[in-house]
């Protein structure tokens, strides 16, 4: 197929899918309140494997349009009857059409949990399903801390199982661009479980690896609960030496980078 024909085919696909999306939104709003209305909403939702076969290789484009349609479905019912029996099908199709669409994993896990305005009690089955979605994302994007952090959050806050959350928080904290709060959460979990030595190790790393004076003050206060005065003085002495080395010899580096590349 020539480049011109491929372009025409792509444009035709785009126009068709956009038209279907607009038509579906109009039809949903126009549906009467009858028992078959929910079923009608998925008449134009083929399985993900089928969509991949008919999108002429433009999986990202097809996923973008499917994501728009899934959002319309979610948004419509979130603000009306809160009934979404086909939400899981939308998410499954979306992940199959373009498994490299990172946002779809995070969105899918979120809407799986929070598809009702009252979220005081989320069924365990939905939390486990959200974690399975995040696990798929973690397999696809092993260096992204959002996925293990999300699983850890669900275990800790939604299932009330801090022990199960700890390995995921530790994994997330070890990845590039991990948010700073993860180290503090790990420290808290270690402390509450009585693992004082592990908590000390996490806290020492935090103290030595940050140049933020406000954070250092907070960490110093935290040290008083876990360490005796001699231990605190030793760590503070190391921190001052490293800070001086950084300022004297490596001022052109960000301190976080200096902490990673310096000699042990």
Image (cartoon, helix red, strand yellow):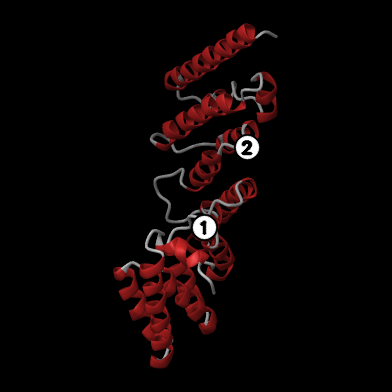
Camera-side residue: 75 or 220?
220
- 205 left or right, relative to 213: right
Residue 181 in the image: above or below residue 263: above
Residue 167 position in % (x across, y down): 59, 66
How far, Cα to Cα, is label 2 from label 1? 20 Å
Residue 48 position in % (x across, y down): 65, 30
Numbered disc 1: secondary structure: helix
Residue 104 in the image: above or below residue 38: below
Q: Quadrant of residue 5?
A: top right
Residue 155 in the image: above or below residue 14: below
Residue extending furthest toward the front: 249
Label 1, on which residue? 149
Residue 238 in the image: above or below residue 104: below
Q: Residues within 10 Å of mark 2 (few under 14, many from 20)?
A: some
* Residue for point 54% across, 16% down: 14
Q: Which mark is residue 99?
A: 2
In the rendered image, the quadrant that contains the N terminus is: top right
Camera-side residue: 193 or 115?
193
Residue 125 position in % (x across, y down): 59, 52
Camera-side residue: 211 or 225?
211
* Residue for point 45% across, 76% down: 203
Label 2 vs 1, first from the N-terminus: 2
In the rendered image, the quadrant that contains the C terminus is: bottom right
């Amino acid at each position: 197929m020539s480049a011109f024909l491929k372009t025409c085919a792509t444009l035709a696909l785009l126009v068709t899918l956009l038209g279907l999306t607009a038509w579906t939104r109009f039809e949903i709003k126009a549906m009467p309140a009858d028992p078959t209305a929910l079923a009608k909403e998925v008449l134009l939702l083929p399985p993900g494997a089928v969509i991949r076969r008919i999108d002429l290789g433009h999986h990202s484009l097809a996923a973008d349009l499917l994501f728009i349609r899934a959002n319309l479905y979610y948004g419509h019912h979130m603000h009306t009857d809160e009934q979404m029996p086909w939400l899981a099908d939308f998410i499954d199709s979306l992940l199959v059409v373009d498994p490299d669409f990172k946002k779809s994993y995070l969105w899918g896990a979120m809407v799986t949990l929070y598809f009702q305005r009252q979220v005081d009690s989320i069924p365990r089955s939905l939390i486990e399903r959200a974690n399975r979605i995040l696990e798929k994302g973690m397999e696809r994007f092993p260096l992204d801390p959002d996925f293990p952090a999300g699983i850890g959050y669900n275990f800790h806050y939604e299932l009330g199982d801090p022990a199960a959350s700890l390995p995921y928080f530790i994994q997330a904290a070890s990845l590039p661009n991990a948010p700073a709060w993860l180290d503090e959460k790990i420290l808290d979990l270690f402390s509450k479980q009585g693992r004082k030595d592990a908590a000390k190790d996490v806290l020492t790393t935090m103290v030595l690896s940050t140049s933020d004076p406000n954070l250092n003050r907070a960490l110093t206060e935290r040290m008083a609960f876990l360490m005796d005065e001699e231990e605190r003085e030793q760590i503070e002495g190391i921190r001052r030496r490293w800070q001086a080395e950084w300022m004297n010899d490596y001022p052109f580096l960000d301190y976080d980078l200096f902490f990673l590349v310096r000699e042990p």
